[in-house]
Amino acid sequence: MPPVHPQILGKLEHSQKVLETTPSGHPTPAKLPSRNPTRSFWIDSSPDANPLAGQGSQDPLPSEADICIIGAGFTGCRRRKRTFTGRNGGHLTPAAFTRFAQRQALFDTVEAIKSYELEQHTTSLLVKIIEENGWASDVDLVEGGHISLLFTEKEAKNAHNDFDMARQAQLNLDGVEWLSKEELEKEYGVPYPGFRRPGYNVWPLKLVTKLYQHAQAHARQYASLSLHTRTPVTAVTHETTSTYTVVTNWGSISCSRIVHATNGYASHLLPFLASPDGIIPARGQVMTTRASVGTDQIKISSWSGNKGFAYWFPRPVTRDTEKPLIIIGGGQEAAAPSRELYVDDDSETHPLVGKALREFLPSVFEGKYDPHSEPEMEWTGITGYTKTGDPFVRPNLLAANPDRDLYKKQYIAAGYTGHGMPRAFGCAEVIAQMILAEISDKEWKEPDWLPQRYLTWNRRVE
């Protein structure tokens, strides 16, 4: 049997309950990112993985700008400090129907449907951009589908109930395929039922690099776009009713609009978000391990199991005889009771989480992974959790804080709760449209696929 933890909750339920308390009882703002983070496969395994690592870090900062974007992951690069995009699990897979019944009960049917439409929009848009620009091989895009394993009868029952409720609500379920225990055992050697849905995996940092380079090339005819890495923002001050000063270790920039795209670190500059109702940093852990068999047995699908607390996929191989390298993340349930919530330090790994990750694949795929092998690389990164599992996508920060004038024309897209790849780029699109509408003195029209609740600070949780 795999190291299943039936008592743990899914990410959404888990964040609702555990965020109510903190280790000290008093939430504190997140610190700046670590100066000596653990070495990530996406950043450190290849000399060409991060060509923008030092971009602008030695250049003088401009004295002023129209818009300052703090953070340069999928959210920041959509709109134009180090980002979790270089430290995550590499999955680009939209949720299909899981937790539909819960979302329908908490919100309503339309809102529940939009939760999935946003992810489908984001994923399809990114894939379209990759394919239209011929980047697929550059960013290692693989369309292998995603298989979710169901380890317990209760988990399988809930999944079928979600599917039935979603189908009755006419949610788009194209590409969803139920797989019996017998089918999965025959094809993959895993003795559990599950379901397959459309999904991709990608080298996330290489994709963000391409997006920035693409944006910079196209922005030249309209505006000046510059990137300053290794330039942490230490404060934002209010100069006048329409001007801010963004303070960094290398100087300050005067600007009229600010976009906060720092996810789990958001409360460092926005301390009112350091609460269970705000954005809580949480540490995720990922490692690379080598399979004992070839791609003919491992295949190319990405996977998840243990209610989403384990997720993995095989990297593309370059030789037929090569044993696939597996990227696997999760295991936070092993760090009970906090499960790595309120942790903003990615300079170290958690030994119990590492143990859970090492044991997981050998126990699920008998004979295909060596239980005694050590990972080739292991790292952590900081995500941003919210009580409902939904990000904040706000046109301004007024409603969140009594000091209303201090936050006028500050925007935020953050709080993806460990599920940013299929959501961040779409949420950033919304912020970009908001800013463009404001600058053009036009009315902003929200996209049909955007959940209304993303736009409010008032979240209903039961």
Image (tube, rainbow, N blue to C red):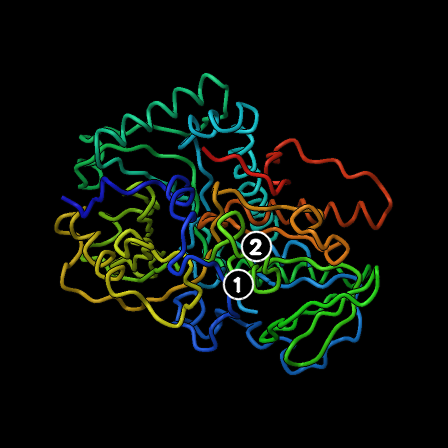
Q: Residue furthest front?
A: 25
Q: Residues within 10 Å of mark 1 (few under 14, many from 20)?
A: many
The part of the image, by quadrant, that contains residue 325 is bottom left
Q: Which disc number belongs to residue 29?
A: 1
Q: Are marks 1 and 2 in contact (CB under 8 Å)?
A: yes
Tell me the quadrant of the picture where the C terminus can be found: top left
SS class, disc 1? loop
In the rendered image, residue 56, in percent from the top left (x then y), is placed at 65, 77
The three-letter code of the residue at mark 2 reads: Leu
The three-letter code of the residue at mark 1 reads: Pro
**Residue lying at 30% horizontally and 61% vertically, measured from the top left:** 319
Residue nearest the viewer, comparing 20 with 185? 20
Q: Residues within 10 Å of mark 2 (few under 14, many from 20)?
A: many
Q: Earlier in the sequence, mark 1 or mark 2?
A: 1
Quickly name the residue at label 2.
273
In the rendered image, residue 8, in percent from the top left (x then y), is placed at 28, 43
Q: Is residue 241 left or right of residue 264?
A: right
In the rendered image, residue 230, in percent from the top left (x then y), is placed at 58, 76
**Residue lying at 41% horizontally and 62% vertically, measured from the top left:** 343
In the rendered image, residue 29, in percent from the top left (x then y), is placed at 53, 63
Residue nearest the viewer, comparing 207 with 14? 14
Q: Is residue 40 above or below residue 438?
A: below
**Residue lying at 46% horizontally and 47% vertically, measured from the top left:** 419
